[in-house]
Amino acid sequence: MVNGRPHYKLEVWQKSMLLVKEVYKSTAAFPKSEVYGLSSQMRRSAISVPSNIAEGAARKSAAEFLQFLNIAQGSLSELDTQVELSQMLGYVKPEDHAKLTSDITTIFKLLSGLIRSVRR
């Protein structure tokens, strides 16, 4: 734990922070017309994942933590859809699409496992 911040020790938070970086790199090459559209929405969805994990980890009850983990999972689903749309529109390189899809799958599994663990 860094400076008493509980989210730093969570692998799902660490990996979701790296996902944000990948989304920023991938969307940098999007058409200028998408600066306030799909590119911006993908970045906001990506940022929402580690942000909600962190906020939930700072809460005092398991119920509150679960609420924020569920929001993070919803944002991840939103990002997954946006990644698919960006691929359909030809905005994302095939190798970036593969990396983002793989990362999203991994984070989904980690989030689901953490949610199950917190529910116990």
Image (cartoon, rainbow, N blue to C red):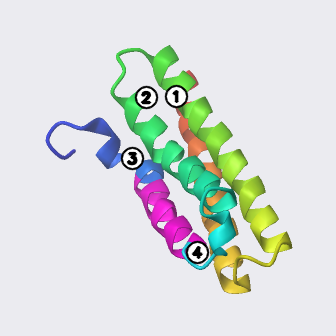
Q: Which mark is residue 56?
A: 2
The residues bearing labels 4 and 1 have C-alpha atoms spaced at a distance of 26 Å
Where's residue 60, x and y in %?
35, 16
The residues bearing labels 3 and 4 have C-alpha atoms spaced at a distance of 25 Å
Q: Give the residue at mark 1.
A: 68
Q: Nearer the viewer, mark 2 or mark 3?
A: 2
Start-end of magenta stretch: 14-27
Task: Give the position of the C terminus as an image quadrant.
Answer: top right
Q: Nearer the viewer, mark 4 or mark 1?
A: 4
Q: Quadrant of residue 55?
A: top left
Query: Which residue is pictured at 80% across the width and 78% down the height?
Result: 90
Which one is in front, 31 or 119? Answer: 31
Q: Nearer the viewer, mark 1 or mark 3?
A: 1
Query: Which residue is pictured at 47% across the width and 24% down the height?
Result: 65
Q: Give the residue at mark 3.
A: 10
Q: Amino acid at mark 4?
A: Ser
